[in-house]
């Protein structure tokens, strides 16, 4: 691609191989002369060698720079049909030449033709720009001259806007980060310009700029921070709007007090404030603020709220009466309207008869027919509505009759039932009065208790002491019960052990009797002569077997008395022997007693050095002590010799 770009640049700069795109070079030179600039061709060659700047129209004015601050590189917005015209840009140390669309197109066609002649296909479309990243402030600038410096880059692009940082590479490209986003569009305007350092025509001093969007983490981070800030502002604005539109919360309901109770009783009697007062009463009851002291007050308020039921029923009856009157009025008005509709329809029917119909024109007849149909439809609709109202009234009347009939029957048969219900109601009312009297008595008792505070304190302390003593007695009783249960369990265990002991003694006695009776039972057949001749050998064998059994039993009884004492006296010492054996087996060259004890004390801190040394000394066939080292480094070490000692033991 670099070779193709270089070839395009050489083709564009070769004036002999390609014709000038301008039809009249003199007009181009005159226009540049009027602007106070030296007439230059697209290849950088002077068109008029004998140019005199003093002859132009802008004599005494410095040559105009399109990138001068205040003018701006980007031209004013034009219609899409008109192509954007780029101009030559003069800087202090370089010159920027705009791309010629026709020249670039001809060069591209020639390069493609040459590639086809060589048998290769190469398309050179104009370099495309990537999609703009969000919050982009960094641009990629490629195609820089090899001799371009950072100062030159700043000189060219600083006029687009303030530059924050420049990262230049050794491969003729760089990244420029601007302070504002809109300056990136001005920098993209320079894409396609050919740059030349001074008046040099060397390849290292020329290049074709390619400016594109670049994705930088700093730009993305700043853009995300800005978006988060905007989102926070939007949430704050919505919250404020919701708070403004939210209906005000109802005032909190006060807690029960004597003053509030008296005010609430007055409000319950007032019809206009009854709804609010009932809500407060309901809240007090649901909160659990009813106690023995204020139960009578709450009951009186509930009773006053109950008295409003009669008022509400009267209001409902009044509203129902008004509704019935309105229905009757509406029915009468609807009947009058229907009468008038009948009259209008009769007029249309009379007009449609032949006596009057023949005298109307076709248009009049058409209108009369249409009006008659509309009047009949409206009359039918209203007639159906009136009939529906009458049917509803008839159904209500029939329902009332059906309800009155069973009530009259029940009234004849339910004489005693009504008396029972009345008695129940009287009983309930008497119970309520009794509860009220009890509450009053309790209130009086509490008031009398307040008059004697000292006695009440003493009673309270005595009650506390009594409660503590009761708790102590209960604890002692529980302990006694537990001790009794333990004693019973131990007695049962002792009984079981005694029974087992008796059984074992009886078994031992029976065995001894059998052993004693065994030789005598076999001595009787020996006296006979026949068995002396035949089975002398057998008798001797039996006697020897009996003697062997007796000797075996005697040996078993005498074994625990005659055997030598064991060097391992407890299970703990046996565990120590096993652990020390495995430890010394892992250390074939032996280990000192301190090393062995330090290992064992990790398992149990109560193990002492003397205990371990005495245990090892009691087992000479398993462990042996040797001296190792020379001179001052002599050391006593214990070694495991169990595999050798098992042969000699």
Image (spheres, helix red, strand yellow):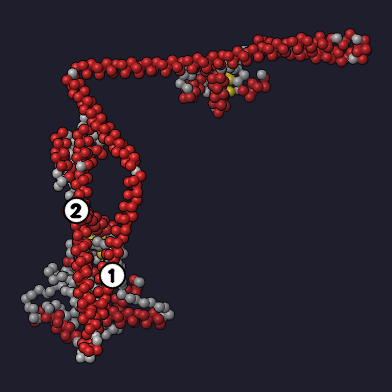
Q: Which mark is residue 384?
A: 1
Q: Residue 301: x, y in percent?
A: 20, 38
Q: Residue at x 31, y 60 (%)?
A: 395
Q: In which quadrant is the C terminus drawn?
A: top right
Figure disc tally: 2
Horizontal relation, residue 196 to residue 626: left or right: left
Under circle 2, the secondary element is helix
Query: As drawn, which residue projects farthest toward the left?
Result: 60
Identify the residue under disc 2. 318
Q: In which quadrant is the N terminus drawn?
A: bottom left
Q: Residue 9: x, y in percent?
A: 29, 76
Snapshot quadrant of residue 265: top left
Q: Which mark is residue 340?
A: none
Q: Residue 54: x, y in percent?
A: 8, 79
Along the viewing direction, whichever of 597 and 365 lies nearer the viewer = 365
Along the viewing direction, whichever of 47 and 232 lies nearer the viewer = 232
Neighbourhood count class around disc 2 (C-alpha, 10 Å): few under 14, some 14–19, many 20 upward: few
């Amino acid at each position: 691609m670099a070779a193709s770009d270089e070839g395009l640049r050489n083709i564009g700069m070769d004036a002999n191989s390609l014709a000038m795109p301008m039809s009249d070079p003199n007009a181009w030179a005159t226009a540049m002369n009027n602007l106070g600039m030296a007439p230059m061709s697209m290849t950088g060659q002077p068109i008029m060698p004998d140019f005199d700047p003093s002859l132009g129209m802008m004599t005494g004015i410095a040559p105009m720079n399109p990138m001068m601050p205040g003018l701006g590189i980007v031209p004013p917005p034009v219609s899409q049909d008109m192509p954007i015209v780029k101009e030559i840009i003069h800087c202090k140390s370089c010159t920027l030449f705009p791309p010629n669309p026709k020249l670039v197109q001809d060069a591209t066609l020639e390069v493609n033709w040459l590639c086809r002649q060589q048998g290769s296909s190469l398309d050179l479309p104009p370099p495309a720009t990537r999609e703009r990243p969000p919050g982009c402030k960094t641009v990629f600038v490629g195609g820089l001259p090899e001799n371009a410096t950072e100062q030159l880059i700043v000189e060219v692009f600083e006029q687009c806007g303030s530059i924050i940082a420049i990262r230049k590479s050794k491969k003729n490209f760089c990244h420029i980060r601007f302070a504002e986003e809109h300056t990136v569009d001005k920098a993209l305007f320079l894409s396609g310009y050919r740059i030349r350092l001074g008046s040099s025509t060397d390849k290292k001093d020329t290049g074709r700029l390619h400016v594109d969007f670049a994705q930088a983490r700093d730009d993305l981070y700043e853009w995300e921070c800005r978006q988060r800030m905007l989102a926070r502002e939007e949430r704050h604005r919505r919250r404020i709007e919701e708070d403004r539109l939210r209906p005000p919360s109802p005032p909190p309901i006060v807690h029960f007090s004597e003053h509030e109770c008296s005010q609430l009783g007055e409000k319950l009697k007032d019809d206009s404030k009854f709804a609010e007062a009932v809500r407060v009463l309901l809240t007090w009851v649901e909160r659990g603020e009813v106690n023995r002291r204020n139960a009578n007050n709450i009951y009186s308020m509930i009773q006053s709220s109950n008295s409003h039921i009669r008022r509400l029923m009267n209001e409902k009856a009044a509203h129902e009466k008004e509704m019935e009157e309105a229905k009757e009025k509406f029915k009468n008005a609807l009947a009058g309207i229907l009468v008038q509709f009948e009259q209008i329809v009769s007029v249309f029917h009379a007009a449609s008869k032949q006596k009057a119909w023949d005298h109307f024109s076709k248009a009049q007849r058409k209108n009369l027919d249409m009006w008659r149909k509309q009047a009949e439809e409206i009359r039918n609709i209203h007639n159906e509505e009136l009939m529906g109202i009458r049917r509803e009234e008839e159904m209500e009347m029939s329902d009332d009759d059906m309800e009155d009939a069973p009530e009259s029957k029940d009234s004849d048969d339910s004489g005693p039932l009504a008396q029972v219900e009345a008695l129940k109601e009287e009983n309930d009312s008497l119970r309520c009065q009794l509860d009220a009297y009890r509450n009053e008595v309790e209130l009086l008792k509490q008031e009398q208790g307040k008059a004697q505070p000292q006695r009440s304190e003493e009673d309270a302390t005595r009650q506390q002491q009594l409660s503590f003593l009761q708790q102590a007695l209960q604890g002692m009783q529980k302990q006694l019960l537990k001790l009794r249960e333990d004693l019973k369990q131990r007695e049962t265990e002792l009984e079981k052990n005694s029974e087992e002991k008796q059984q074992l003694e009886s078994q031992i006695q029976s065995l001894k009797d059998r052993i004693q009776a065994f030789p005598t039972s076999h001595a009787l057949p020996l006296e006979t002569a026949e068995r002396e001749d035949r089975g002398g050998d057998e008798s001797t064998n039996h006697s020897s077997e009996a003697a062997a059994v007796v000797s075996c039993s005697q040996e078993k009884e005498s074994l625990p008395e005659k055997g030598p004492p064991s060097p391992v006296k407890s299970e703990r010492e046996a565990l120590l022997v096993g652990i020390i054996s495995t430890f010394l087996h892992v250390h074939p060259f032996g280990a000192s007693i301190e090393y062995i004890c330090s290992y064992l004390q990790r398992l149990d801190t109560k193990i002492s050095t003397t205990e371990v040394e005495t245990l090892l000394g009691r087992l000479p066939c398993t462990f042996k002590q040797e001296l190792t080292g020379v001179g001052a480094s002599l050391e006593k070490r214990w070694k495991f010799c169990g595999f050798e000692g098992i042969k000699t033991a």
